[in-house]
Amino acid sequence: MSLTSAPPALAAVTAPRPGCIGDRVLRNEDGRFLAGHGEYLADLDVPGTREIAFLRSPVAHARIRAIAIPEGAEGRVFLLKDLGDIHPVRAVLTSPGFRGSDYPALAADTVRFVGEPIAICLGATRAEAEDLAQEIVVDFDELPPVVEIEQALDPASPSLHGWPDNICFVSTPGGGDLDAAAKAAAVTVSREFRMARQCVVSLEGRGVMAWWDRRLQELVVYSSTQQPHVIRTVLAKLIGVPEHQLRVVAPDVGGGFGVKNNLQQEEVAIAALARRLKFPIRWTEDRREHLIASPQAREHRVRLTAHADAQGRILGLEAEAVVNAGAYSIWPWSAAMEANMVAGILTGPYAIEAYRGRGVTVVSNKAPLGPYRGVGRPSACFTLERLVDEIARAVGREPHAVRIDNMVRPEQMPYRTVTGKLFDSGDYAESVRQAAAMIDVPAVRARQTRENGKGPRFIGLGFASYTEQTAHGTDEWIARGLTEVFGYETATVRFTPDGKLIIEAAIQNHGQGLETTLAQVAAEELGVDPADVVVRHGDTAVSPYGMGTFASRSMVMAGGAVGRASRQLAEKVKRIAAHLLQVKPDEVTLAGNCAVAGARSVPLKSVTDAAFLHPENLPAGEEPCLDETTTFQPLSGTGAFAYATHAVVVAVDTGTGLVEILEYAVAHDCGTMVNPMIVEGQVQGGVAQGIGNALLEESPYDSGGQPLASTFADYLVPGAPEVPTVRIAHLETPSPFTAYGIKGMGEGGAIAAPAAILNAVNDALRPLGVELNETPITPKRILTALHDARTERAR
Amino acid sequence: MKVSFTLNGEAITADVEPRTSLADLVRGEHRCTSVHLGCEHGVCGACTVLIDGKIARSCITLAVALDGTAVTTLEGFEGDALMDRLREAFRAHHGLQCGYCTPGMLITAHDLIRRKGALSEAALRQGLAGNICRCTGYAGIVAAVAAAMDEHGDTARAAAIAAE
């Protein structure tokens, strides 16, 4: 076990108190959003602002011969050469063999995907800026594009970045004796799976606004980002403005899901240009830009082979995951994040002792790949869990029973996986049992016997289980070869003289409810009313340094930091209160906005009054003021592992190819829950995105590298009729490695849904000889598979 | 081009380009920033407003077409008992996360309840199908609208009984 800091003294909460950890507290942030007073990037009202339209490449791969700017457009059109001495983004891993490439803020010589920014155009309105962009003529010398995975793997294809081929990185995680496992196996099952390229689709697009503040002598950059401090660090390096003269602010952010969790080229270009202008400039991404030019997600081809015994227990697993990472490597994750993650976690929640993995990252003339809820895991879960179903069929058992037999058992915890992850706690099999009970397996099987084959609708049942690595610590990011190590989080907790509390956190809240849950943590330690706590975040000027909100980390990391800071602050509050009450500090408890000792109590307001305004009332030697800043790192460098089993019942209409979800149940464990209402909202929201992944969402490209989905008419996301209300069972096994036993859980809902739904659809269509191993399973894919199966049978 | 209409009860006259959308007009000089732009092609519903009491997509409505109409954005629902009830229900049922779709959802839900009174869950979901939420998975929204719908029905029935 790797310990990166002293054991946290913050024990799991067993009996929730009102307003504290474990309570269903309604959200502090709701008021402004329900009033329509959320302030997103496009809502900022700064006098003199000019709006930006980017001129973007209309072709997938070309050299730029010349750019003709219309006469009279001086001072309104800016190319790379106009941005000053700035560095291209170079997102690499420290891992040996990783091939780096430069990603300039604006393309000057070569464009490598449709949508790549070439020029910044300014106007009083976006419309005027777009008019200007249309007048610019770019002379392209088109090059043959590399589009699909097979082309990218072909050494004969043109090389995008001057490498010998288009392979960016190959990782080979694994361990154990695979050959022995293969020899001992009763069954060997192999399949190839594909998960389509997706767009992330935050409802608010990306956006950046920047200006030079003459009084403070600093560059102010507002960005719809999940990680303002980290963006400040990298922007400073790239554009040559020192960090102490750079302020990055994320205002209200209308959804992130990962697409705002990396450095954007637009951030670099706009920050660099704003440094040289005397007025603010703003870019608001529109939907077309989001669908073609934002970092995209997924696009995996995974070949998987399992060797199992006659009961379906997996003895060994062999995998090759190829990921089409698009044209450029995104900072800080690099192009190899997806493939490395898939190959690194493919053994899932199972005790698989022999594994040989290969993660291959290829580049192509598509939009760069970035993180999206689940990162790699929806694909890893989909492929492994589809294969587990096929193993179960091969040995003639119920799939959920085979899952139970393969899982890491509670007595094995903490369990080191064959790829080096440390599972912390939990009863994985119990999640399967609870999901199976909720969905009522015998009843579904009886219904299938009764109904399937009697008409066009076929009922199917599917399961999927996973572990969700959350709050990845220092060891994990080092093992992944990241150039920056996101192993901790920070918070300041400060009272004001009138007895109120402010939390200043480096995370960024964009829907996760952190303005409420962090207040609950403070309430746990300080006895304050969480509704009365102000949580400030997302601004490098208002909090100490920290990493941001991603990788299901904020509740664990920032929650831990707020907990530690509040605990330390509580000690001082107690000492002052004890002095005021003339009792010993250890007699004092904090509750109901008061310090209480037996029958006597003093309001916190009196304590803060002494601390800030009346130092003469402090105990001897006590320093004035009441604030604390601390950091938090989990004890295990690979983080805390949440887990779950999803069970779903579908009806597949073999006439239309439409899939209807009839029942959806989730049994999950994210350790100690700070706010079960918010946890359930995250599960439900994640499942909805997983349903999109399974059934609807796909960003196809034609052979010339043109993206074919550029509106919500082509790129379908789930609406209210497509997403059932999920039934959720909570298991609650605290993590031994985190404050209060909290595990992260923000991504989990999205991880298992594609696997569970594909398993259910395959279960339904199995009698018709159909097997589908590619997402999304659109009506067209289902009908084609049915047609092919009929043709096959007729032969 | 000159166009005159009432915005949230206030008479306004604006000089707009033919291409200016209602959304850009009200978000701009009138600062009705509850109107959110999620797609600008009439699919996502984040920009939903009322025009003469009917829900409309302000992103694909040209401002010049509004002469003589009454436009209501979420800012114009102050003191509206049903909207207050919906807001409370959205909070109680965790019907919002990032808040970006919320104004459009509220106006659509308000319209559904006003026009339809009571609906089955399936019909309610169909009624919300023109508004995309990427965060919640809709469960909290559906529960909130159903709760507000029930309460609204109770209030309407109580008012009818009182009037008899």
Image (cartoon, rainbow, N blue to C red):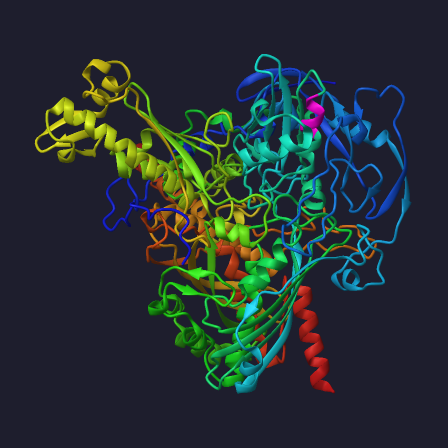
Q: Main secondary structure of the magenta part?
A: helix
- Residues rendered magenta in the picture: A270-275
Q: Position of residue A442 (x, y in %)?
A: 40, 77
Q: How many marks?
A: 0
Q: Is residue A273 magenta?
A: yes
**Can you say which quadrant of the picture contains the N terminus of chain A?**
bottom left
Q: Give the side of residue A685 with respect to residue A69, left or right.
A: left
Q: Is residue A642 visible?
A: yes
Front residue of A56/A238: it is A238
Q: Quadrant of residue A178?
A: bottom right
Q: Quadrant of residue A276?
A: top right
Q: Position of residue A234 (x, y in %)?
A: 62, 35
On screen, residue B31 above or below A361: above
Q: Position of residue A37 (x, y in %)?
A: 49, 27
Q: Is residue A74 magenta?
A: no
Q: Give the side of residue A395 with respect to residue A609, left or right.
A: right
Question: Residue at left 80%, top 25%?
Answer: A77
Front residue of A459/A312: it is A312
